[in-house]
Image (cartoon, rainbow, N blue to C red):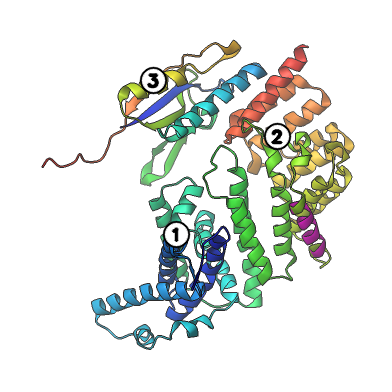
Amino acid sequence: MKYILMMNTMRAGQGVPQWDQKDLQAHIAFMIGLNKELRQSGELVSAEGLAFPDQAKLVRAGKDGVPITDGVFPESKEFLAGYWIVDVDTPERAYAIAAKASAAPGPDGTPLNMPIEVRPIMSGPPPEML
Amino acid sequence: MTKPWDTTSEHLLRELAPQVLGSVARRFRDFSSAEDAVQEAMIAAFTQWPQEGIPDNPRGWLIQVASRRMTDQVRSEIARRQRETAVAKDVETMAPVDEIESDTDPDDTLILLFMCCHPALTSSSAIALTLRAVGGLTTAEIANAFLVPEATMAQRISRAKQSIKASGVPFRLASPQERAERLPAALHVLYLIFNEGYASSIGGHLQRLDLAREAIRLTRGAKVLLPEDGEVTGLLALMLLTDARRAARTGPDEELIPLDKQDRTLWDRAEISEGIELLTAALSKGSVGLYQLQAAIAAVHDEAARAEDTDWPQILALYELLKRVSPSPMVTLNHAIAAAMVHGPLKGLELLRTLDTDARLAGHYRLDAVRAHLLEMVGDYESAIKHYRIAASRTTSIPEQNYLMTQAACLAERKLS
């Protein structure tokens, strides 16, 4: 079963986190380690971090399909910061991975406990019943 | 009689790919189908040879397998269309492999390179097609290198071939004039392949194909075919002189290590001396182009035993030349760094101001990153921190972002103490 684990932490206009060097490094090392672990366990399908919301554009098709872009977002809006797609045996395992990611260290090593949204990914047609 | 498969065999097989393709494409006068047939022959070889050994005449083997696929395809086409064609006659009277063998022409690889780097193609299509047709890589390997699904890459390659077909370029050697026009595009594609490999060589993707190494291999091949061209040699030198620093460029946690902090004992001496030798030979030929100049700058860095030994006045002079030969905002940016190293950071900051109104750089993280670096040199930590953070929020490279955020954090601590 495939699940997407979405990390919604970013807010527009906030810029990059202004942590101490050691906290920053601990956080980076944690994220690299988590990906390595999921790759080694054979559960990682893909993981991507997204660029900062300052670069996000909201696009709609205008007349004749010409893109109309909107680049300024209200400050309160939450943004996807990154996601993992994992292939696991049980939903519990997906929740466990999400909990681990959620507890990534923040300032002074305190777990951030970020909310991670976990959702099953739709699959192809089921096997035919014989 | 066969030879056992060893570590050099894969290299041999890839080297044969463009020669085989040239021969089959000329024979059947259909580049697109020939390219598919050779890909199938390559995959067959990759499956069979490691087990059964390398045939006595590997090129002949590949030509035969690819030609058989072509013949099957042409026959079914004829059966379907029920009509006689010139190709059908060719099929009937097809020469035995030994004769086709003598038909291979070293210029085929060059024809293929120019064809795959056709200006009608987008760079991503040209890169994919070059790696497959000239580099002898499989679609799966190329897809893996660019982290896209194999079906996507197969479609990209097939559309590239359709564009080439539509453009009506014949499969023949370009005239010297056409060659001079097309060479920059071909070199640019090789340069992009190298950069892609260099940029993605971090991030734990060890199982990925080494694109930087493939680019070096292809450029070596181009140099054999065009030994007198200073820019081909210059590009090869640039790749070697850059690749030489690869092991020192990242730390144990995949973090970026800037040039002045790298452990220079990790630099690859063999690559550096080969690069310098090539560059010297290229420069002695007279005309100086963009790749030779960039290689010369890389060589000056590589020659310094310690960062503080770097001959910045020479680098500055080279950037001034490069600004004239190939002006771009990125060159101006690097020129400003060199000027700062020679005449002090204030001079560098002054040069950066000329870029503030340049639309090509608007919002580009590199401008903020360089400004932050120069402000740090001046001692204006507060402004430097601000620009490091802006740059961090604008880059789309994770290692670069981590580096820029760390720089900001480091200065914030230094400011307090």
For label 2, the residue is B257
Q: Nearer the viewer, residue B403 or B394?
A: B403
The reply to the same-chain question for discs 1 and 2 is yes
Q: Horizontally, is B42 left or right of B369 in the view?
A: left
Q: Horizontally, is B355 left or right of B109 in the view?
A: right
Q: How busy is the neighbourhood of tag 1: few (under 14 within 10 Å), some, or many (20 plus)?
A: many
Residue B132: percent from the left, percent from the top?
49, 61
Does B131 sit above or below residue A41? below
User: What is the chain letter for disc 3?
Assistant: A
Kindly state the secondary structure of the residue where label 3 is placed.
helix
Q: How busy is the neighbourhood of tag 2: few (under 14 within 10 Å), some, or many (20 plus)?
A: some
Asked if the residue under mark 1 is in contact with the one under mark 3, i.e. CB atoms within 8 Å, the reply is no
Q: Which mark is residue A9?
A: none
**Is B272 included in the stretch rendered in magenta?**
yes
Inspect the image, locate mark 1, and give the three-letter code of the amino acid beneath it.
Ile
Asked if the residue under mark 2 is in contact with the one under mark 3, i.e. CB atoms within 8 Å, the reply is no
Please give the range of residues in magenta. Answer: B271-281
For label 3, the residue is A96
- The residues tagged by marks 3 and 2 sit, at their Cα atoms, a distance apart of 34 Å
Q: Nearer the viewer, residue B272 or A23?
A: B272
Asked if the residue under mark 2 is in contact with the one under mark 1, i.e. CB atoms within 8 Å, the reply is no
Inspect the image, locate mark 3, and give the three-letter code of the amino acid beneath it.
Ala
For label 1, the residue is B157
Q: Say whether residue B324 is visible.
A: no
**Is A77 included in the stretch rendered in magenta?**
no
Predominant SS along the magenta part: helix
- The residues tagged by marks 1 and 2 sit, at their Cα atoms, a distance apart of 36 Å
Q: Which mark is in front, 3 or 1?
A: 3
Q: Say whether residue B335 is visible.
A: yes
Q: Residue at 54% of width from left, 72% of height from top?
A: B19
Give the quarter of the image for residue A7: top left
